Image: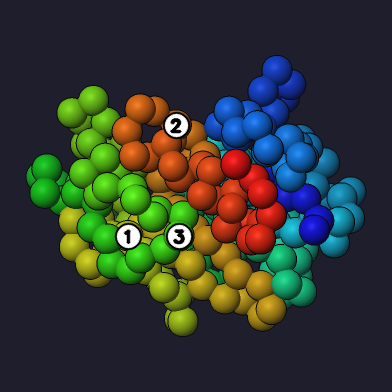
Amino acid sequence: MKPSLIFSFGYSENPLGGFADIPAAKDHIVSCDLYALPELELDRFSSLLISMHSDQQFLAAQADRIATFVRDGGTVVANGHFAYPFLPGMIGFHTVEDCHLKDLAVVRVADHPIWSGVSERDLTFRRGVAGFYARVWHDAPAEATVIHALGHADRPIDILYPVGNGRILFHGGNDLWQFRGSDTTAQIGPQLLQWLFPGERVS
């Protein structure tokens, strides 16, 4: 199967980010600087992994290429607050006004193998503080499956939706592959890799 491509930002000592802690990741994921995107042959890759730290204004200038990649059967996993139109079907984020602790609780709306065995409490709290997983929500595109929401089921934060022959998984917060602590969120990275490469041994 074609490898995944994760975009780096000049940090050559750890180009795979949180995936570096997964031994099999180096056999399935390659890294490239984000600003090399215009020259890349995207059909060499099965998926694109986009960090919350990405330059979305630059990505918006590449939106047509990204959309074509997905429509042709590729997968995009993107994180962050959607501020520029680089993904088809997505629009801007919403903050929660008059926010209270209950409004930051991560609510599971649908089961998904990436989050199998991951508790909603561990998603909500990190060292007793809420909001590290997500602090804003996004409107779900048509035909989307909402996996998690923020405080209420109608405030999506994890969204999976089809585009042509491909799919987009959007997480409205910190990079999914950065959760690798001592609680159940440590399962997200390995299970995301398994979802990207079904049937292959990635553990």
Q: Nearer the viewer, residue 39 or 107?
A: 107
Mark nearer the N terminus (1 vs 2): 1
Q: Residue at x 57, y 65 (%)?
A: 168
Q: Nearer the viewer, residue 110 or 61?
A: 110
Mark nearer the N terminus (1 vs 3): 3
Q: Name the quarter where the C terminus is drawn.
A: top right
The residue identified by callout 3 is: 113
SS state under label 1:
strand
Q: Where residue 191 sits in the image (x, y, percent)? A: 51, 49
Q: Is residue 64 visible?
A: no
Kindly indicate the quadrant of the structure image that contains residue 151. bottom left
Q: Residue at x 57, y 58 (%)?
A: 195
Mark nearer the N terminus (3 vs 2): 3
In front of the other: label 1 or label 3? Answer: 3
Q: Name the quarter where the N terminus is drawn.
A: bottom right
The residue identified by callout 2 is: 180
Q: Is residue 14 visible?
A: yes
Q: Residue at x 64, y 45 (%)?
A: 202
Kindly indicate the quadrant of the structure image that contains residue 24. top right
Distance from the alpha carbon under mark 1 to that under mark 3: 13 Å
Kindly indicate the quadrant of the structure image that contains residue 22. top right
Q: Badge 1 local density, few (<14 within 10 Å), some, or many (20+)?
A: many
The residue identified by callout 1 is: 148
